[in-house]
Each structure stands twice: as C-alpha cells, then as structure tokens.
C-alpha cells in the first residue's frame, strides 16, 4: 500500500502542470528595445567601417586634383 501511494505521489509530482504566468507588456518593450539597439549598432558599424574611409578617400582624391 505504501509503495502504491509513493509511486502515485511521485508520478503526480513529475507530471507537468499548466503554467499560469502573466507576461506583461514590459517584456515586449524590452525585446523591441534590444532588437532596435542591435540594428542601430550594426548601422553604426557599417558607417564607421565602410562610409568614413570611402569619404576620406574621396576627399583625398578630390584635393589632389
């Protein structure tokens, strides 16, 4: 009898129950801010690595003429 009770209790504890958690709008705003921050960082990276050296090269070539 004890074994049956123990096995039943263990199987009920291991069964997943439904989660009733509330995810508020703060999570969506935080995720949106993270995505926008990553995109802004990539844009700044492209500007810094590609645009400015080309701009300096153009100015250098233009001043040589």
Image (cartoon, rainbow, N blue to C red):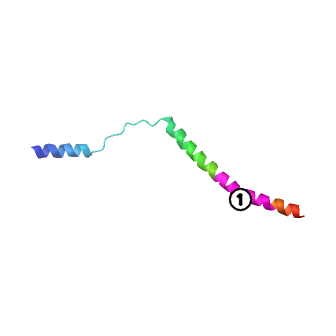
> What SS does tag 1 mark?
helix
Q: Quadrant of the N terminus?
A: top left
Please say whether residue 10 is one of the residues in the magenta stretch.
no
Callout 1 crowding tier (Cα within 10 Å): few <14, some 14–19, many ≥20: few
Left or right: 46, with 32 as reference point: right
Please say whether residue 44 is one of the residues in the magenta stretch.
yes
Quadrant in the rendering for residue 47: bottom right
Counting from the top left corner in percent of width and height, residue 4 is at 13, 45
Magenta span covers which residues? 42-57
Q: Observer-nearest residue: 49 or 13?
A: 49
Counting from the top left corner in percent of width and height, residue 25 is at 51, 35
Left or right: 39, with 14 as reference point: right
Q: Quadrant of the C terminus?
A: bottom right
Q: Residue at x 87, y 61 (%)?
A: 63
Quadrant in the rendering for residue 20: top left
Left or right: 34, with 24 as reference point: right
Left or right: 6, with 44 as reference point: left
- Tell how many labels: 1
Counting from the top left corner in percent of width and height, residue 52 is at 74, 57
Q: Residue at x 84, y 63 (%)?
A: 61
Q: Observer-nearest residue: 5 or 38?
A: 38
Residue at which label 1 appears: 50
Farthest residue in the left direction?
A: 1
Q: Residue at x 52, y 40 (%)?
A: 28
Counting from the top left corner in percent of width and height, residue 27 is at 50, 39
Q: Is residue 51 above or below residue 19?
A: below
Tell me which secondary structure the magenta stretch mostly adopts. helix
Quadrant in the rendering for residue 6: top left
Q: Residue at x 75, y 60 (%)?
A: 53
């Amino acid at each position: 009898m004890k074994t049956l009770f123990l096995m039943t209790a263990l199987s009920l504890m291991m069964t997943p129950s439904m989660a009733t958690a509330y995810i508020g709008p703060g999570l969506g705003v935080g995720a949106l801010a993270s995505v926008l921050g990553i995109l802004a960082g990539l844009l700044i990276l492209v500007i810094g690595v590609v645009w400015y050296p080309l701009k300096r090269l153009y100015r250098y070539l233009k001043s040589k003429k």
